């Protein structure tokens, strides 16, 4: 079947009063001045930070142009997808097979990894439609990679965001400015941390629909957003491209796809025709470098004839002499020379706790003057930690305030202990960043007590009736998930493992006198397995220790059962 890449839909029906009313209703649901902050959270009015210098790094796409076509008013009819796909029902309801498969696989993956997000695959389809017309009508190969790159316009500040090159042209082929890349239109600086390997080939390629769809899903599910909640759904979409019109367009397609879709063969999907920047969005490869201008011809000394006052004659316009070249005012981001620490304290925390200090840096010019309205990115580096920023993400972007200071969201320690790095960089500039070392220590307890005062006794060869249970606290509070060890020791002065007396059993019934890798529960409680006694009688000691130095020694007694005295004999 011939690909319909040249087709342009003319949707006069979509401009009817009904469609207008639908979009108006969507628009009315948004507060005026809605935008997103540096972390992608929705804000309004005076609390909203505008994107400095037109830099759209706070969004996945850099706020690049998008398709504004709205779906048809009539509801599509779902068709089965077994066997050879057939384009039935409304053409707009047809999604290229590979592209549709990528959306569904990404949603399935997110339902397992982030079930609370409730991401519908139709949302990915709606964004894919608005961003690239479903990868230019499904113009992808069998692996899901676009046959020709899909690139947004150069983000040089000329009618678009101003985002200097961040990838050396690796993704977008432009080593001067960034451009949105691929079917889901990620800018390189966002793809660098948000990219995913959706098809398991070991690569994260923004031009591959499987990789891009999974990355888009993860991006929409960050900050613990629940996309079944309308407010969170709006916030997530606005974080992808910060425009109320964009939000309304995506919501329209989401509702349309929810009513039914069907597969069509790759390369035969319909293409949208209207873009928010007025272009047709057909750019699929990097723009060529401008050619050297030719020597201008000498203008004729004879001025052109003026236009006749009436009639249809053609006139030659009078050439306009070029105006003076105005100096370009550098953006705040371009004036930044270096980053300085802004009073960051020591970054330490116990596993599971929030760090008491936050990373803070200041952007400065070469002369040491603070620069406001600059985006600073904070990144938790490496795979050796499960620490995150508040909201569960490893990356946060914050705009510097009037003093040039950007403060990262609070760090939250995970369960992995040890050191990790928080790296700070200036978005849109290739400058040496600042690295901060943070450390996570194990959970601790400073006190252990038994939960019962019942004496622990047993007869030789028997088993203790009561199990040992202790409670751990730290500074008076419950010490949960604290590591502990229990050992049957030789004496109070000799903490080596005893070779006789009471013992535990392992899973195979073997004698064990040391239990490692124990952990207190959420209430700080630790209940040991049942204890048994060999034939040795006497008093024995069980010592329990925890991370943080808490120690408790419990006394165990093994004694033969007392022989009852005979009753006295009576003489009649």
Image: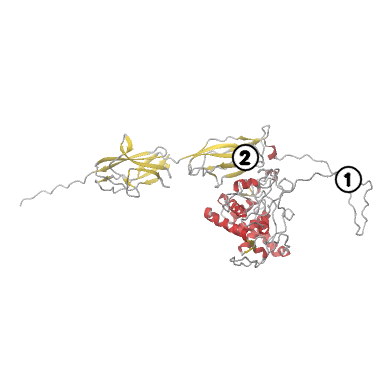
Q: Is residue 547 left or right of residue 176?
A: left
Residue 297: mark: 1
Residue 197: mark: none
Q: Secondary structure at mark 2?
A: strand
In the displayed structure, would residue 214 be above or below residue 270?
above
Tell me which residue sits at (19%, 46%) in the image.
562
Q: Which residue is mark 2?
A: 425
**Residue 473 visible in the picture:** yes
- The residue lying toward the viewer, choosing from 27 and 226, is 226
Which mark is nearer the camera, 1 or 2?
Answer: 1
Q: Secondary structure at mark 1?
A: loop
Image coordinates of residue 414 in percent, x first then y, are 50, 44
Image coordinates of residue 218 in percent, x first then y, are 58, 51
Q: Is residue 8 left or right of residue 212?
A: right
**Residue 29 visible in the picture:** no
Q: Where on the picture, by quarter, is residue 170?
A: top right
Between the C-alphas of marks 1 and 2, the distance is: 49 Å
């Amino acid at each position: 079947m011939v690909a319909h890449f040249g087709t342009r839909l003319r949707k006069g029906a979509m401009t009817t009063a009904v469609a207008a009313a639908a979009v108006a209703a969507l628009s009315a649901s948004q507060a005026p001045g809605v935008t997103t902050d540096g972390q992608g959270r929705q804000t309004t009015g005076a609390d909203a930070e505008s994107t400095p210098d037109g830099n759209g790094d706070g969004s996945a796409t850099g706020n690049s142009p998008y398709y504004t076509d709205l779906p048809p008013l009539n509801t599509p009819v779902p068709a089965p997808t077994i066997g050879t796909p057939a384009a039935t029902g409304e053409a707009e309801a047809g999604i290229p097979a590979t592209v549709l498969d990528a959306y569904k696989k990404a949603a399935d993956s997110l339902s397992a990894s982030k079930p609370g997000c409730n991401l519908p695959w139709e949302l990915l389809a709606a964004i894919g439609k608005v961003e690239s017309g479903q990868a230019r009508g499904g113009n992808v190969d069998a692996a899901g990679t676009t046959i020709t790159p899909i690139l947004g316009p150069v983000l040089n500040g000329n009618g678009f965001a101003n985002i200097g090159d961040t990838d050396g042209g690796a993704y977008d082929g432009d080593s001067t400015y960034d451009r949105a890349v691929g079917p889901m239109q990620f800018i390189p600086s966002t793809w660098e941390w948000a990219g995913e390997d959706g098809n398991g080939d070991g690569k994260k390629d923004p031009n591959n629909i499987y990789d891009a769809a999974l990355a888009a899903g993860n991006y929409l599910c960050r900050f613990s957003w629940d996309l079944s909640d309308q407010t969170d759904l709006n916030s997530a979409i606005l974080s992808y491209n910060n425009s109320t019109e964009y939000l309304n367009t995506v919501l329209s397609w989401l509702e349309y796809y929810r009513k039914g879709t069907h597969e069509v063969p790759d390369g035969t999907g319909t293409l949208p025709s209207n873009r928010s920047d007025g272009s047709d969005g057909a750019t699929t490869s990097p723009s060529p470098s401008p050619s050297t201008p030719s020597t201008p011809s000498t203008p004729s000394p004879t001025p052109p004839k003026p236009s006749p006052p009436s009639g249809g004659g053609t006139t030659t316009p009078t050439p306009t002499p070029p105006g003076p070249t105005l100096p370009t005012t550098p953006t705040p981001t371009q004036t930044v020379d270096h980053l300085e620490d802004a009073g960051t304290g020591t970054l330490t925390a116990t596993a599971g706790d929030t760090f008491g200090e936050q990373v803070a840096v200041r952007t400065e010019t070469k002369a040491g003057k603070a620069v406001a309205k600059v985006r600073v990115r904070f990144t938790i580096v490496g795979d050796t930690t499960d620490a995150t920023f508040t909201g569960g993400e490893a990356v946060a972007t914050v705009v510097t305030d009037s003093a040039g200071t950007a403060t990262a969201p609070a760090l939250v320690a995970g369960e992995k202990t040890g050191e990790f790095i928080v790296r700070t960089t200036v978005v849109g500039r290739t400058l040496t960043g600042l690295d901060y070392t943070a450390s996570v220590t194990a959970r601790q307890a400073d006190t252990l007590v038994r939960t019962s005062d019942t004496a622990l006794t047993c007869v030789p060869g028997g088993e203790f009736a009561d199990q040992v249970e202790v409670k751990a606290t730290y500074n008076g509070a419950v010490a949960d998930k604290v590591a502990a060890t229990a050992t049957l020791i030789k004496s109070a002065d000799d903490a080596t493992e005893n070779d006789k007396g009471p013992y535990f059993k392992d899973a195979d019934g073997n004698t064990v006198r040391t239990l490692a890798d124990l952990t207190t529960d959420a209430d700080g409680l630790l209940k040991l397995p049942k204890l048994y006694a060999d034939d040795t009688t006497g008093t024995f000691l069980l010592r329990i220790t925890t991370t943080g130095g808490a120690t408790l020694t419990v006394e165990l007694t093994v004694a033969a059962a007392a022989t009852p005295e005979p009753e006295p004999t009576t003489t009649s």
